[in-house]
Amino acid sequence: MLAIVSDLAKPAALFLNHLNKSIMAREYPIEKVRNIGVIAHIDAGKTTVSERILFYTGVSHKIGEVHEGDTVMDWMEQERERGITITAAATTTFWTPTSAHGDAKEKIKINLIDTPGHIDFTIEVKRSMRVLDGAVVVFDGVAGVEPQSETNWRYADDYNVPRICFINKLDRLGASFERSYQSILERLTPNAVKMQIPDGHEDKFTGVVDLLEMEFVQFEGAKGEKIVRGEIPAELKAEADKERAILVEKIVENDDEAMSQYLEGKEIAVEKLKSILRSAVIAGKIYPVFCGSALKNKGVQLVLDAVAYYLPSPLDVPPTIGKDEKGEDVIAEPSDTAPFRALAFKVATDPYVGQLTFFRVYSGMLQAGSYVLNTRTGQQERIGRIVRLHANEREEIKEIDAGGIAAAVGLKSTKTGDTLCDPDHPVTLLGIIAPEPVISLRIEPKTKADQEKMGMALRKLSDEDPTFRIRTDIETGETIISGMGELHLDVLVDRMRREFAVEANVGRPQVAYKETITQEAQAEGKYIKQSGGRGQYGHVWLKVEPMERGAGYEFVDAIKGGSIPDEFVKPTEKGVQEAMERGVVAGFPLVDMKVTLYDGSYHEVDSSEIAFKMAGSTALQEASKRAKPVLLEPIMKVEVIIPEKSMGETTGDIAGRRGQIINIVDRATLSLKVIDARVPLSSMFGYSTSLRSLTEGRGNYTMEFDHYEPVPANVAQQIVEGKK
Ligand code: GDP
C-alpha cells in the first residue's frame, strides 16, 4: 500500500504506468534474449557478417554488399566511403536455431550491438562491451589474429564477455583454418576449441563439418539460405573423428559426471554436451571456434545457432552493480518487477526520427510516457517514445523490459554513460570511463554565419561521444577540439560538415599537452580600481596543491569570519577555472590540483562579481607560477609486432622516440616478436610509415592512451618555444 500512497503525488501518467506494470506481460522470455556484439579487426568482415546475420534472421530483406555502399549497419555516409563502421547502434532481430537434432528450437531475440574495430574508437568498443552479454569475434581466415583483434580480445576479457569465434573468409586465396585457429590458441587463449572443420579452402571451400552433431553442412540457394545436412565426406572422416574427440574431452573436463562417463568409454548425448558447453562458455572457460565465408554465404547460420545455444541471456551473467545516494552498492536484478534501471550507452542522430538515446535495461520495465531520473543531472526526463531499431525499420514500442535494449526519442540532457532510473529508487550504475583525449586541433567556421551552427554541432557531437571535448582558448577566442586520435577528429569534423552543414577550417592536429604544479604555493590576487566613478574591489588569497595524476581539479572554500561574503566565492571560483584553462608554462590546461580560497577582503560599495573573478584568475596564475609548474604529455601504450630479424632496428627506433620498452615476447610459430612499449604521443606521428620501412612492410602496431607524464625539461623547452 505504501508504494501506492507515495505514487499519488506523481503525475497521473506515471501513476497509471505503475499500475500497468503488474498487468502487462513481458513480450519475450528473458532467457531467450541475447545481447551480443560482433567484434573484429578492421576488414575481417564484421560488416559482412552482421549483414548476413540480419539477412538470415529475416529482417534484412536483401543482401547489401559493402562495396555497393548499401549496408544496413553503416548508417553514416562516410562510413561507407571509408569502409569502416564507426558507431555502435543496436539492432533487434529474431532467430530460430536450425540444428536438426531435437534440442531447443525455440526462437531467440537478438539485440545486435554494433562495435567499431578501429583503435581510435576504443571508447565505442568499450561501451559496447559494457552493455553486451556475449560476443562473436570475427577473424580473417588469411591473417588470423591481428593486432587489433588482440586489443579487442583484452577489452572483452576486462568486461568478462563470453565469446564465440568465427574464422571468416575461408574462400580467400591463402586462407587457412588451421593456421588461424593456431593463432587464436597462441595469442588469445589456450581454451579455444574447434566446433567445426572446413571442407576445402579458397574456391574449393564447400561447407563445414559440425563436430558435435557429426554432420556435414552445406549452404545452398542464391544466398546460402538453404541448409543441407548430410554425411561427412569420406576423406574428412578421420580428421573429424580426431577433432571431435578433442572437443568432447575439452567439454567433459567441465562436468564430473560426464567426465566419468567419458572415462568409462560411454557415449555422451549431444544435448548433454551442449548444455555443459553452454555453462563453460558463459564461465569463460571455453571459446568455441566456427568457420566459414560470410561473403560466399557459408557458415553464418551456424554461428547464429551457437549464439542461441552458448551465449548467455541477461539472466546468465552476473547482475550489474550500482551505487545509491548514500554510496552503497545496489544490485540491479535482471527482473521485470525490480525498479527500473538502465544505462544510456549511445546517443545518435537518426535521419528519420532525430536524436536517439540507446539504453540497456538492467532491471525493471519502462513504459513510453513515464518519467525517469537521470542521476548525473538530477533531472527527471519524460520518455515520450521508445523505438526499437530493426535492420531497415524503426518500430515504436509501448514498453521495454529487463534485459532489453531500445532507444528513447528526443531526450535532451542525457549523455552517453548516464544512468536512467526509477525516480523513487535513485541508483547510478557503474558507467563507462572515458579515456582522456590526447590530440587536439583548432577549428574555425569558414563564415561568420556558421559560428553559431558550429557551436551547436560540436555540443551535439560531444554529447554523443565522451572522448570528444571542446574548449575555447580564452586568449585567442579560438575553438579547440580534442579527441582520441587523428582519425577520430577527422571523422567528427567530417560529420559536422555532412550532418550539420557547417564548413570549417581546421588546424594541424597537435598533442594535447597539459600542465600541472609540483609543489604547494600561495598567492594573492587583487583587482582594485578606485579612482573616479564607481570603483572595483576584489581581493583574494589562494593556496594551490598538487593532486595525483588524473584527479582533475578541486576547489575548497575555506573562508572564515566573512572576510569575503558568500556571494563572491562562486565568482572567484569562476575566475580560477578560467585561468586554469590557460596554464602558465605554455598555455595548456592546468590539471590535477586543489585550489583553496582561504582569505581576502572586500569593499562595501566597490566589490562586484567581476572584480572577484578577475582577482581569482590573477591569484591562480601567480600561485601556479610559484608552485613549480610542469608540462604533461600523453604517453601511449604501443604494441609493435615485427618479424624477428627487424628487432634491432625497431627497438632502436623506439628508443629514439623517447620510448621505453616494457616487454618483448615471442610468437614462436610465426617467428614474430611482440614489443610492448610506452612512447610519448608526440613522437608517434608518422610511425606507421617508419615501421613499414624498418620491417619491409611486415610490421604492425596498435596504440592506445596510457597515462600523462611530465615532459623532460629539454623537450619542454622546445614545446614552449614552439608555442611562442
Ligand atoms: P569490417 O571492416 O570488419 O566491417 O569488414 P567488411 O565486412 O567491411 O569486409 C571487409 C572486406 O572483406 C570487404 O571487401 C568484404 O567484401 C570482404 N569480405 C568480408 N567477408 C568476406 C569473406 O568471407 N570472404 C571474402 N573473400 N571477402 C570477404
Image: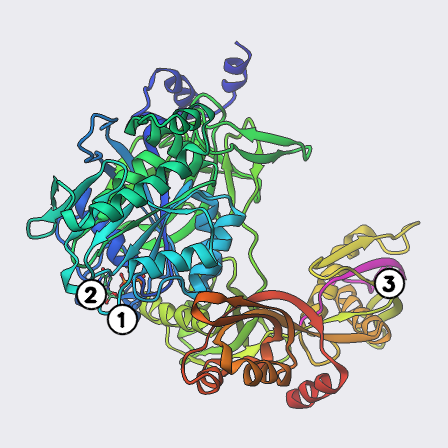
| Mark number, residue 81 | 1
Q: Secondary structure at mark 3?
A: strand
The CB of the residue at mark 1 lies under 8 Å from ligand 1: no
**Residue 140: where, in percent of width, then height?**
31, 62
- Which residue is depicted at the point 30% across and 55% down? 167
- Asked whether residue 387 is in view, the answer is no
Q: Which residues are magenta?
A: 589-609
In the rendered view, tell whether residue 119 sits above or below residue 402: below
Is 233 left or right of 611, judged from the image as shown? Answer: left
**Of the residues shown, which amino acid type is indicated by label 3?**
Lys
Per the model, the C-alpha gap separating discs 3 and 2 is 59 Å
Give coordinates of residue 95: x percent, y percent.
23, 37
Work out how far the residue at label 1 is from the one at label 3, CA to CA, in angstroms.
53 Å
The quadrant of the picture showing ligand 1 is bottom left
Instruction: Residue at the far top: name it.
Output: 1
The residue tagged 3 is 543
